[in-house]
Amino acid sequence: MTETEAFRELRAALRERGYFGRPTGRIALELLLHLFMAAGGVSIFLLASGWWRVCGLPLLALGSMGVGTNTHTSSHSATSNKTWINEFLTYFGYPLCFGLSATYWRYKHVLNHHSSPNMKGVDGDFDLLPWFAGTAEDIRRASGWRRIYYGRLQVFVFPIAVGLTLPAQQLTGAVHLIRILRDMKRRQFRHWIDLFSLLLHVAVCLVIPSAFFPVGNVIAFYIVRDVISSYAMFAIFAPAHMPAAAARVSKDPARMGQPLAQTLTTLNFKTGLIGKMMCSGLQYQIEHHLLPDISHVHYPQVSVFVEEFCRKHALPYRRYTWGKGIWLSLLSIETPSPIESIESVRFRASIE
């Protein structure tokens, strides 16, 4: 039996146990809790005085990331059996709450990243050029000042640039959406919904507050929220794919079986209570990449079956502590890993 056939049996077994059920009510309650925490952080920042105002920022970050990761489940159609509910929550969470185009998110993350994680030339989450060299080959192919920058300086610039992650994705997403809307053959009604949600985000987060507070303060607070959210995003997504243990692979999706593609390029990380609230199941990245259509609520139970499946079929199943995963992610910028061929990937998987 091939690993792909065995994976189909795993899905069937999980379905029989009810893990493909979508606990919409629980996920909605989690979303409300995250929204309440984010609103509480904003309230503390506005109402408190002096340095006490800063205490609202961690609560805002925790609530905001909870909204983002909860919405992530909806973007994979795993919140509800009803398509319109998943769509509504995706537009609410990403364009409305974060100013991030849902159209761009589906293209960049749901389509490209999940089909080809850490695959050079396909996965935009992994390919950081021209700003940073994500692989040893990127450094070797560079010349002049770029080679000096990639080899010696990017490790110092990267931690600062992480704070621009969300603003960069907001801008890139808006450009991506506008290009689609300008193309009569590509645009659909859902793209107009995406645009409307983005405009509503601007109104709610910038225009309306500017009627009650100085414009400069409103913009400054918006930037601070974006920067804090960017670092929180890095803490959640980077440990899953950036450490050296997560393989960087060459572009050859046709020759790479799905279970191997997902497990060799993906890592799990362990969190405490706060981490669980922030991540909404994304600490179980291997389970998520193998089974993105399962709700995050089920991942703790599903992980037992997935780990057994990986061990049985000689597929890697790695996990780190959260802190170690973040640290190894930063080290991967100092010493980028090489790109591996499909053959070397399979060989390494067989001996791990």
Image (tube, grey):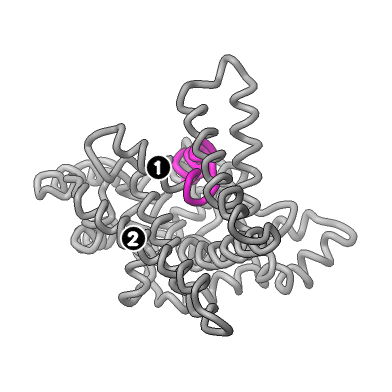
Would you place residue 153 above or below residue 55 in this image?
Answer: above
Percent coordinates x, y for residue 253 in the rendering:
49, 39
The quadrant of the image that shows the C terminus is bottom left
What numbered label is drawn on residue 318? none
Q: Is residue 135 visible?
A: no
Bin the neighbour count of mark 2 within 10 Å (Cα to Cα): few under 14, some 14-19, many 20 and up. Answer: many
**Residue 234 position in % (x across, y down):** 53, 64
Q: Quadrant of residue 299?
A: bottom left
- Specify the label residue 280 is tagged with: 2
Q: Which mark is residue 90?
A: 1
Q: Name the residue rendered at 30%, 48% in the picture.
A: 291
Q: Residues within 10 Å of mark 1 (few under 14, many from 20)?
A: many
Outermost residue toward the front in this view: 212
Quadrant of the drawing holding the N terminus? top left
Q: Is residue 220 above or below residue 324?
A: above
Which residue type does callout 1 highlight? Thr
- For mark 1, give the secondary structure: helix
Q: Magenta segment range?
A: 95-113
CA–CA distance between discs 1 and 2? 15 Å
In the foreground, 85 or 329: 85
Image quadrant where residue 351 sits: bottom left
Quick one: which residue is furthest to the right in this view?
144
Q: In the rendering, at what x and y percent does residue 63 appear? A: 41, 64
Q: Tell which circle, 1 or 2, labels the residue nearer the N-terminal end.
A: 1
Towards the viewer: 169 or 260? 169
Main SS of residues in magenta: helix
The residue type indicated by label 2 comes to Ser
Secondary structure category for the residue under label 2: loop
Q: Nearer the viewer, residue 126 or 99?
A: 99
Residue at left offset 73%, top offset 69%? 157
Left or right of 344, for residue 330: right
Magenta residue check for 180: no
